[in-house]
Amino acid sequence: MFAARGIAVSFSVFVLVYLGLSLAVACAWRRLWVYSRRYPVRRSADLLFTLRVFPLLAAATVTAAFTVPSFLLLEPRSIDEPIGGIPLALGLAGCLLAAFGMMNAGLAVMRASRTITEWLSEAKLVDASGPVPVLRISRVIPALTAAGILRPKVLVSSTAEFILTEKELHTALRHELAHVRRRDNLKKLALRLVAFPGMAGLEQAWLEMTEMAADDAAVSSPGEALDLAAALIKLSRLSPPQPSTELTMSLVHSPAASVNARVERLIGWSEERELPAHGYSAWYALGAGVAVVAAFAVTYSQLLMHVHTATEWLVR
């Protein structure tokens, strides 16, 4: 009974923190996004992704660092206390939430694996000299895409090779390699794990920002920016922009308005965009982190007592 009560309490706290923070993120992310747009797009993309996974990370941290230790250290094992209806319901909801997330991520991996295997059935190796192999596929769509998580690869269609100039193709390939370096396919898998209603807008905004971040990483001069813009225009004419296959990052994907915005940014590219934004030194972040850890170390026992009091109220 002690173990069952501990599991129910832990899942209850996890669900309450996760749902509360998820609702807060769903309501506040647009304001933070507008504020972050004064910085380089890669920082905006990182901020949006951090916001999206923050509820899960925070809920897991609170549960593992405070709820479980407070229960194990302060809950009497000799008391045969029944599990109340509220922690039982919340605990069940937590189990279902975890199962749904893992099932959603697993299905995404299966669908992506099946599609990529189909693409690779007649693929030919184009370049294996770099850290990521480049393969030619016979399909027209996707024209260019980064696929895979553990063994990433860049796929380019024979049609894309035919219609793009050498400079346009090389710049487009650098765009896809930027996705691999940023581990964007792994991030898309993480988003499947934390599926939550009302987050579609945040996820779409992150996808648009991460595409622009890859654009910026692929170009270093106005000429390269124009080459990438030309590649986007040419490849978008092959077919209407379509959603990317799960756990892949295609050069051209829906919505069309996003592609148009990227082309406009590239045409207006300037070297000032590459300049680092003014920010705080890493020493400030390190100092703040040390201060937070020290504060928690000093007050940890008191925090555990407060958490145990709160969970006792929850059990009753």
Image: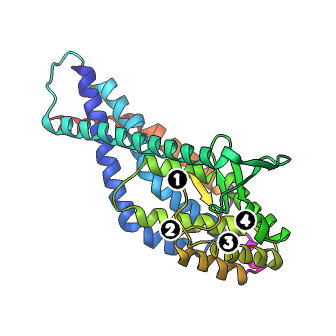
CB atoms of marks 1 and 4 within 8 Å:
no
- The quarter of the image holding the N terminus is top left
Q: Which residues are magenta?
A: 269-283
- Front of the two marks 1 and 3: 3
Q: Which residue is mark 4?
A: 159
Q: Position of residue 171 (x, y in %)?
A: 78, 67
* Amino acid type at mark 3: Leu
Q: Nearer the viewer, residue 142 or 304?
A: 142
Q: Which residue is mark 1?
A: 246
How many other residues sit within 10 Å of disc 3, few (<14), some (14-19) or many (≥20)?
A: many
* Amino acid type at mark 4: Thr
Report how far apart the C-alphas of labels 1 and 4 lie in the structure. 22 Å
Q: Nearer the viewer, residue 164 or 58?
A: 164
Q: Which residue is mark 3?
A: 235
Q: Which residue is mark 2?
A: 205
Disc 2 or 3, which lies upstream in sequence?
2
Q: Position of residue 307 (x, y in %)?
A: 30, 38
Location of residue 10 (image quadrant): top left
Disc 1 or 4, which lies upstream in sequence?
4
For numbered disc 1, what is the local secondary structure? loop
Report how far apart the C-alphas of labels 2 and 1 lie in the structure. 17 Å
